[in-house]
Image: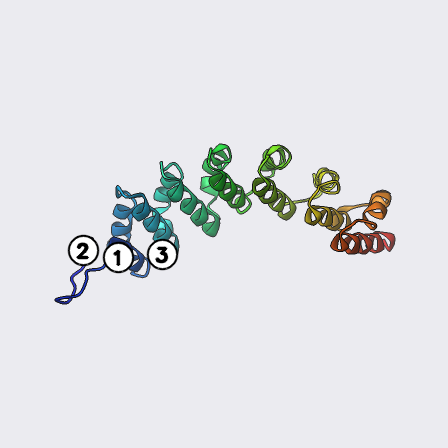
Amino acid sequence: MSCNSPSGAHPPTTHQVIRKLALQEGAAALKALANAAGLEDQFERRAAIDAIGRHPHGRELRSIILRALRDPSEYVVRTACEVVAQWELQEAHELVVALLANPSKATRQTAIRTLGTIWVDADFPTVFRIYNDAWENEIRREAAWVLRQRAHSAHWRTLFDAFQVDELARHRQWACELAEKFSVPDILPVLSQLSSDVDGHVRKAAWRAIQTLSSR
């Protein structure tokens, strides 16, 4: 991975060469990116994974992205997750699920976010358990966001019951929005309580839900 430079000019760094490969068509560029993904330096490997994700034909190297999800470097793993999310690469589902137990908080957070893009219904109990049990606020919030995005009629009430008593006002607001979208009028008493919430956004969402349900 070398590049000639004019006399007296500094040769490009490996990172610069890798980034340029993301813009080059042809099998030679893909082969060079595949080789770069196996370099010893973790940051060069991360750059290669990122470049593969941005390359117009990067999906031809999806096996390398899958392999990168098991890389010893958390930086490489998280970048691979970002590529999976960008591509919505369903083949990576089980590898991403495995990362939910990763010791690194940043990696778990990225894995939760990525799982939201390749979601299957069976993921709900796992992510809901993380939302309930995680002690890190960032992890709970990431799980809640994914659950809110993927809510449907089979489990919206489970989310509503959890969100409507959450300390975070945004989650109580989401409870109101879920009720407005999925509910039946028997949930109106709970919404009435939320319409007196200390947070103005929650009150507004509760009143909107009450009006919607009352008109059905």
Q: Answer whether labels 1 and 3 touch (C-beta < 8 Å).
A: no
Earlier-in-chain disc, 1 versus 2: 2
Left or right: 157 in relation to 88: right
Q: Of the residues tagged 3 and 2, which is closer to the observer? A: 2
Give the residue number, with chain letter if any, for mark 2.
2
Q: Which mark is residue 130?
A: none
Q: Secondary structure at mark 3?
A: loop
Q: Answer whether labels 1 and 2 touch (C-beta < 8 Å).
A: yes
Give the residue number, with chain letter if any, for mark 3.
55
Q: Give the CA separation, mark 3 to mark 2.
A: 20 Å
Earlier-in-chain disc, 1 versus 3: 1
> Residue 173: horizontal and vertical position, in percent?
73, 50
Question: What's the residue type where badge 2 is placed?
Answer: Ser
> Residue 95: horizontal and vertical position, in percent?
45, 36
Q: Of the residues tagged 1 and 3, which is closer to the observer? A: 1
Numbered disc total: 3
Q: Quadrant of residue 39?
A: top left
